[in-house]
Image (cartoon, rainbow, N blue to C red):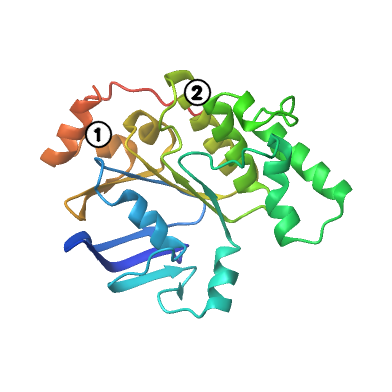
Amino acid sequence: MRALIEFDNVTKVLAGQAVLDGVSFRVRRGEVFVIVGPSGAGKSVTLKHMVRLMTPDAGRVLVDGEDITELPEAGLRRVRERFGYLFQSGALLAWLNVAENVALPLREKTREDEAEIERRVAEALRLVDLEEHGGKLPAEISGGMRKRAGLARAIIRNPEIVLYDEPTSGLDPVSSRTIDRLIARAGRDLGVTSVVVTHDLHSALSIGTMVAMLYGGTIVEMASPREFMQSENEEVQAFLRSQFITAEGVWERNAR
């Protein structure tokens, strides 16, 4: 099966350092592909290349077999329409309530009438368990709820692919596991392909179908969650130990 997203020997140099150094991987349709690694490993840089917010210095990025590396602006807009994006902060506009934030992509990018917009917003808020909070401003809800509202906005136009930038960052454990369940639910109920970058291994091992670790500009391991825990790579094992996860499988899949 052709990969939905493919990195082919991608290199990106920033401030004289190769943040990505010949990185190659394939994301298949329907996967939850999780990229982990320490801070500064290039996780968010990788995510930005998928929608060409950054362009590689060498190598290619393909979306559904199409090389987007040098795609003209019109073609790039078409490709970006296939993506939803959950920003690390949630990125809600402070002066709009939750429902208005979620509706923003529909009002900016479509010609849907208000009745249809309201219906779709209500459906998206239901999916992330915020149906009672649409009238509240971002400042009136918790950080976890802001992330959930950001997820509702990311899926409102039924994208094929959703990119998640540190979706559990700054959240307490209960809120983090709620976000994990919602990512799994979006994949299951909407059929989206998910790419998640995170330093949270508990999240990665709970929701991922494939886990890749970036370290020193390269992917040092790429495997299923169980195989990832049993990796013999020393950097992988050190990263696992730092979050109290053992090769024997002391962990729990929470996304049910």
| Count of marks, rendered view | 2
Cα distance in 3D space between marks 2 and 1:
24 Å
Q: Amino acid at mark 2?
A: Ser
Dot 1 surroundings within 10 Å: few (below 14), some, or many (20 or more)? many
Where is residue 175? Give x, y as percent.
50, 23
Farthest front residue in view: 95
Where is residue 102? Give x, y as percent.
68, 43
Decide: is 109 above or below 240: below
**Residue toward you, 178 or 111:** 111
Q: Amino acid at mark 1?
A: Met
Residue beneath label 2, please? 175
Residue 232 seen in render: no
Q: Is residue 3 left or right of residue 124?
A: left
Specify which label sits upstream in the sequence, 2 or 1: 2
Residue 184: which disc?
Answer: none
Write the residue at 20% across / 27% down: 242
The local secondary structure at tag 1 comes to helix
Q: Is residue 164 left or right of residue 218?
A: right
**Residue toward you, 155 or 14:** 14
Dot 2 surroundings within 10 Å: few (below 14), some, or many (20 or more)? some
Q: Quadrant of residue 127?
A: top right
**Residue toward you, 150 or 178:** 150
Residue beneath label 1, please? 229
The local secondary structure at tag 2 comes to helix
Write the residue at 19% across / 26% down: 241
Where is residue 239? Give x, y as percent.
20, 34
Decide: is 91 above or below 193: above
Q: Which of pointers 2 and 1 indicates the residue nearer the eye?
A: 2
